[in-house]
Structures are given as structure tokens and as C-alpha cells.
Amino acid sequence: MTHALPPIERLKQVMARLRDKTAGCPWDVEQNFATIAPYTIEEAYEVADAIEREDMDALREELGDLLFQVVFHARMAEEQGLFDFNLVADELATKMIRRHPHVFGSAEIRDADHQTEAWEVHKARERQAKASAGDDPSALANVPVGLPALTRAQKIQKRASRVGFDWGDAAPALDKVAEEVTELRAELKTGTTADERTEEELGDLLFAVVNVARLAGADAETALRRATAKFERRFRQVEDMLAARGKTPEQSTLEEMDALWDEAKRAEREAAGG
């Protein structure tokens, strides 16, 4: 495989060789769109993780892995006579030009917020065109069901907001969270913590919290991922402090672990402040 080719062409040749039915890799040859999709999602998460950790070496590698997923899907489509990588890239370039008339045309954009509004207008027009061609006309159409639940909830809420179905700001949405907490608390008092009604109330509470995040200008998925990372970091510190005492969490009490948790939190805040 020659290095004289442009990198993307070399990568496409590597992919074609991997998928060769006689000389390729048996695993790669067996794959299809459905079997590769989970890896595509996983690679996108690994890109996000590298960004979160500010590890640029890892980001370079993970972006390559994600690009490989695009090339993999495009190659399988080419084999079936559907489309190829070049068509994917060309249609993307055309779409970006269409959605940025202030860069490639004569339109004027004042700032990033104005550009976001214009971007949404362009996407809405594209959805209307698809609806005219027989696609789902709903404002909520084509939000992928495979998205993480928090991300999909936020996208659904954003779509509803565009047509005026929205609180307007975070304060009334926060009141809705309090209402959902009250309803969940009442349900939990029944003692049937595993029934469908409890799950429904939990879902309503989570959806309301996502609404607050959106209206506050935050990304719910990112916020929860960071909160989980913070919990993991502090819990590991608790484990380390217990190990220094010759103990494990199983050998400790909740009170002892809670006190160590507060100590870990205090130390972390002092380190951040210093």
C-alpha cells in the first residue's frame, strides 16, 4: 500500500483491502451497517472523552478511529451500489455551503447567536422540503431514537421550543422539577419502588431536569458525564484513604465513608482554589 497517495485515498484503499472477500480480513468482511453501528457510536464517545480530558494525542487517535467508521460505512455502501465516500463528502460540502450563506454568499450574520438562529432556519426549511416530499411533517421528526436518552430529550425539547412550546426561561422549568419531585416522593411512599408508575415519575423528573439544563444554556449529557466523573474521582479518593487505614469500603461504615467523602471534596476544592 503506497504512501504516495493522499492520506484519505490511502485510507480508502486500506478499507477496500480489508473488505476484499478473498484477501481481506474475515472479521471486516463479515460486518454490515447494523453490526458496525455500535462501534461508530463508541468511537464518537471516545472522541468526547479525549476532549473532556484535554488529551490532544488521544483526540488525534480517536478522530482517526471515528473517521475509519465513516470510511467503513461508505465502503459497504459502495459495494452495494448505494453511494461512496466521495459522494458523502461532496453532499456534506454542498450542505455546509447552503447553510452558511454569510460565508459563501451575500448574507450577513451579526454574531454567533444570530448564526445559530439562521442555522436552525435553514434546517427547518430542509425539513419542510422533506415533508413536502412525503416525509414526516412533525417538528419532532428525524430525531434519532438511538441517541443517549438525555441528548434526545434535549433535542426534542429544542425542537418543540422552535414552534413556541416552551417555558421561555429556567425559573418555571425549575418549578416543574419541584412538582415532579413531589409526585415521585408520593409514589415512593406507596412502597412499590419497582412498578411502572414509579419509573414513569422518574422519567418525568429526568425530562424536567433536562429542560432546566437546556434553558440554562447547559448540555444535560455533558453535565451528567462530568458529575459522574466527579463522583468517580472522589469515591476513588475515599477508597485510597480507607486503604491507607488498612480497610476496604466493605469493611467500613457509611458514616466513615461519608466523612472521608467530605474530606476528599474539601481537599479538591482547596486544590482548585489554590
Image: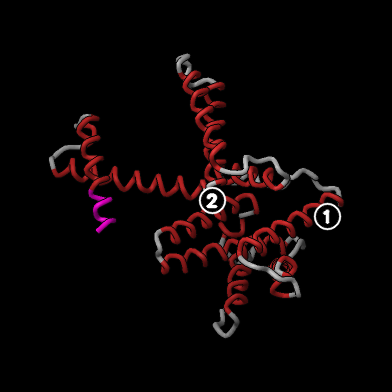
Give how far across and how far down residue 71 sits, in percent: 62, 65
Q: Which residue is mark 1?
A: 129
Q: Main secondary structure of the magenta part?
A: helix
Give how far across and how far down residue 17 sits, in percent: 60, 69
Q: Nearer the viewer, mark 1 or mark 2?
A: 2
In the image as oriented, which residue stretches furthest toward the left? 245
Magenta-colored stretch includes residue 273: yes
Tag count in the figure? 2
Give how far across and how far down residue 248 sits, in percent: 20, 37
Stretch in magenta: 267-274
Residue found 53% across the figure and 57% down from its top = 44
Residue found 58% across the figure and 71% down from its top = 14
Q: Nearer the viewer, residue 207 or 130?
A: 207
Q: Which residue is mark 2?
A: 217
Give how far across and how far down residue 229 sits, in percent: 38, 48
Asked whether disc 1 touches disc 2, contact meaning CB atoms under 8 Å apart, the reply is no
Q: Which quarter of the image is occupied by the N terminus?
A: bottom right
Magenta-colored stretch includes residue 271: yes
Judge from the rendering whether residue 69 lies leftward or rightward of residue 108; answer left or right.
left
Report the amino acid beneath label 1: Ala
Residue 22, can we see it? no
Q: Mark 2 or mark 1, which is nearer the start of the sequence?
A: 1
Residue found 69% across the figure and 40% down from its top = 165
Residue 190, can we see it? yes
Judge from the rendering whether residue 66 lies leftward or rightward of residue 73; answer left or right.
left
Q: CA distance from mark 1 to mark 2?
A: 30 Å
